[in-house]
Image: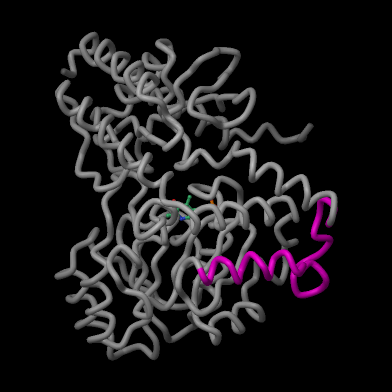
Amino acid sequence: MSVHELPHLQAGLDQLKKDGVFRKLPILEGPDTAEIVLDGQENVVNLSSNNYLGFANDERLKQAAIEAIQKYGVGAGAVRTIIGNMDLHEKLEAKLAEFKREERAFVFQSGFNCNAGTIQAITAKGDLILSDALNHASIIDGTRLSRADKKIFQHSDMEDLERVLKENRENYANCLIITDGVFSMDGDIAKLPEIVELAEKYNCMTYVDDAHGSGVLGENGRGTVDHFGLHGRVDFVIGTLSKAIGVIGGYVACNETAYQWLSHRARPILFSTMLTPADTAAALRAVEILMETDEYQKKLWDNAKYFKEKLGKLGFNTGHSETPITPVIIGKESDAMEFSRELRKRGVYTSAIVFPTVPMGTGRVRCMVTAAHTQEQLDRAVEAFRQVGTEMGLI
Ligand SMILES: *Cc1c(COP(=O)(O)O)cnc(C)c1O
């Protein structure tokens, strides 16, 4: 035990408790599926997972992982640049490049690492990074690690982006515009066609983090770039292997030059051990399945539409989502937490998302509908929303 009592941390925890936002980590007992055992509670409808297609517990992926363990063992053994680069990793990269319709794909241990490592590697002092106000934390951190200057533009506001470009572009060598493809808290899609046009007009590189778009949007889930038909016009297309793909890992689809540069300069690749064989093989199997069929995307979108319509009819504010992400805006931080707790008592698990993850006063429960949910499970969830919403006077 530490000899220090860490009073500054304790004061922070006390404040969280006072604000009603202190939480204990929930414990999932068993696989991440549409209906789960959570903290000993059985038959809980799971509306909190990014496992969009239900792949996290898919038999084919599990089998691929088992076979990879038999053949390659459980660990990569070292960083990629030393001996941790297996043929299996190269196979996954080749398949991802084919799937994403880009020249190459470079795999990292997570989506977070991918952003932290890539942004830092491709920008330098004297460059400028332009970042959407609602970009993911890993983009913010990657930008902090870079020695480039940073400017934020208002969320999806193309006039503001152009204003910042006009005022600053000529003062910098290279300029990188970064946006999420799908914004994870509201479910809206980036205005990628306009961003790409501005990037071409002002000679900027483009970077799309498609963690929530890959596997969800575009042909067979090829992502936001495919959805808008922008192949070849976005320089860095980030995806994660931990959401729709159901496993763990991240990647950037890019051209050969970027690929080579990252393999020399991306710090998570130089200084952290590569993805395990099991994860790599399972992710590879998932991408193969996506390329064979679009039945999972179809089911996902059907389920999301069904659920949103039902909640809308009850009078809930589901924001302006354009994707299966379904926020239900409650308002006050503590109300959102209470709403989530009450749903939980009725066997429905949603995560409460509050400040500072979203702006103050827009506390919400975020519902992640997946392809794996049955209509009966969604109906049960809607009924719980109706009960809690009525009790709390929200509908
Ligand atoms: C989840 C997420 C990440 C991180 O991906 P992991 O694979 O979980 O590390 C990065 N960017 C965005 C936009 C995300 O939603």
In which quarter of the view is residue 251 placed? bottom right
Q: Position of residue 312 (x, y in %)?
A: 17, 28
Which coloring applies here?
one colour
33 or 107: which is nearer to us? Answer: 33
Relative to 342, residue 221 above or below: below
Q: Position of residue 353 (x, y in %)?
A: 37, 35
Write down the region rendered in magenta.
Answer: 72-98
Relative to 274, residue 20 above or below: above
Q: Quadrant of the C terminus?
A: top left
Horizontal relation, residue 42 to residue 6: left or right: left
Horizontal relation, residue 137 to residue 272: left or right: left
- Residue, x 53% and y 71% (percent of image)? 97
- Residue, x 17% and y 76% (percent of image)? 163
- Residue, x 23% and y 79% (percent of image)? 198
Prevailing secondary structure of the magenta residues = helix
In which quarter of the view is residue 179 placed? bottom left
Horizontal relation, residue 236 to residue 7: left or right: left
Q: Quadrant of the N terminus?
A: top right
287 or 144: which is nearer to us? Answer: 287
Is residue 205 located in the magenta-colored stretch of the structure? no
Horizontal relation, residue 299 to residue 157: left or right: right
